[in-house]
């Protein structure tokens, strides 16, 4: 654990909290972190109480004293947030952005300085230390900046470094990915109720089925389609069930979903650029 870094969060929502929970275990001491937001003072106090971090209302001051500035507001709010803190940004800082769709170039532009920016796409499983995070460096980010970002995100799961052009796809795949799994679980729970299973029993069975399948995928070298076939006895129940999924074009629906989420990431970045150009 380093003793020299100080970290300012601009935005104190669910992703900020998930990161703080991980970072304060091995990356830094809670007192090295200061959290800021737009207006919700009670939320800052809550984070202060829970994790022992500092809470501040003056974001510019928080940024002035930080080595790492973490942007954790929604993409639509970043221009306003950066306008408030840009005067305090120094060239030797690292700006770490969690924002879906927003490029490092846009962040550099909003910072009004040649500053190191690393764009990251974690997911909400960071809250339990199991995020799948991808990161990419901007024009002024060095190997060392990427390494620092990697270490930071490793406190909440696994980290892979990708070219920035891949981050829209990563966002559509693993950034939004937990929601797809939850949607499947919702569907399974509804189906279980329809076929008359008691709610708690169904919930336990579904959860263990998901965990078991995920562990199998992790432990085995086999392709998912092979693992699927191993469940599927000829003329059995699985075959009958999968045929229905095929009739409903399940795999096509998933592919379209991920493509659309990927395109939406690009749209969020472009919408911000338009808003900046018009302001
Ligand atoms: N949720 C997810 O699954 C994931 C989200 N992301 C990205 O992480 C970012 C944060 O998402 P999430 O934590 O879900 O968002 P939340 O809505 O939970 O939190 C947003 C935070 O931003 C603050 N904020 C808004 N405007 C400003 C401003 N002008 N200045 C300072 N702070 C501001 C809000 O403060 P206040 O309450 O006071 O308005 C709030 O604390 C997003 O950009 C998203 O794309 C990335 C990966 C996964
Ligand atoms: O839905 C969103 O825009 C954010 C980014 C990835 C997950 N949640």
Image (cartoon, grey):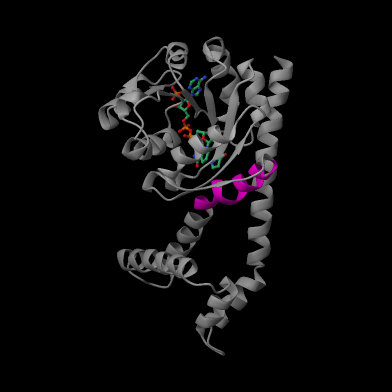
Residue nearest the viewer, comparing 108 with 183: 108
Location of residue 77 in the rendering, given as x and y in whole percent from the top left corner: 56, 23
Q: Residue at x 60, y 71 (%)?
A: 245
Quarter of the view holding residue 200: bottom left
Location of residue 239 in the rendering, given as x and y in whole percent from the top left corner: 57, 82
Residue nearest the viewer, comparing 133 with 211: 133
- Depicted 238 relative to depicted 270: above or below: below
Can see residue 42? no
Quarter of the view holding residue 273: top right
Can see residue 147? yes
Residue nearest the viewer, comparing 89 with 274: 89
Q: Indicate whether residue 168 is drawn in magenta.
A: yes
- Locate the N terminus by quadrant: top left
- Depicted 151 relative to depicted 204: above or below: above
Q: Residue at x 44, y 19 (%)?
A: 66
- Depicted 240 relative to depicted 92: above or below: below
Location of residue 35 in the rendering, given as x and y in whole percent from the top left corner: 39, 23
Q: Which residues are magenta?
A: 165-179
- Locate the C terminus by quadrant: top right
Magenta highlight: main SS: helix
Q: Is residue 119 left or right of residue 182?
A: right
Q: Residue at x 43, y 66 (%)?
A: 215
């Amino acid at each position: 654990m380093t003793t020299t870094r100080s970290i300012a969060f601009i935005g104190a929502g669910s992703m900020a909290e998930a990161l703080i929970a991980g970072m304060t275990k091995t990356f830094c001491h809670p007192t090295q972190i200061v959290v800021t937001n737009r207006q919700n003072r009670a939320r800052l106090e809550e984070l202060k109480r829970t994790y022992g971090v500092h809470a501040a209302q003056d974001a510019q001051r928080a940024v002035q004293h930080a080595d790492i500035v973490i942007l954790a507001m929604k993409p639509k709010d970043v221009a306003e947030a950066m306008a408030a803190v840009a005067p305090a940004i120094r060239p030797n800082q690292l700006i770490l952005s969690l924002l879906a769709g927003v490029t490092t170039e846009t962040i550099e532009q909003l910072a009004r300085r040649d500053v190191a920016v690393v764009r990251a796409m974690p997911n909400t499983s960071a809250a339990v230390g199991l995020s799948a995070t991808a990161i990419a460096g901007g024009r002024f980010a060095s190997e060392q900046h990427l390494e620092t970002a990697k270490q930071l995100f490793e406190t909440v799961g696994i980290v892979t470094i990708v070219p920035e052009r891949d981050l829209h796809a990563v966002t559509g795949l693993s950034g939004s990915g937990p929601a797809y799994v939850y949607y499947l679980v919702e569907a399974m729970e509804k189906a279980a109720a329809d076929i008359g299973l008691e709610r708690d029993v169904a919930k336990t069975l579904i959860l263990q089925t998901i965990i078991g399948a995920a562990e199998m995928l992790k432990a085995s070298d086999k392709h998912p389609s092979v693992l699927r076939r191993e469940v599927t006895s000829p003329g059995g129940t699985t075959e009958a069930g999968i045929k229905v999924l095929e009739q409903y074009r399940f795999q096509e629906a998933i592919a379209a979903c991920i493509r659309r989420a990927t395109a939406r990431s690009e749209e969020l970045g472009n919408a911000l650029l338009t808003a900046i150009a018009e302001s």
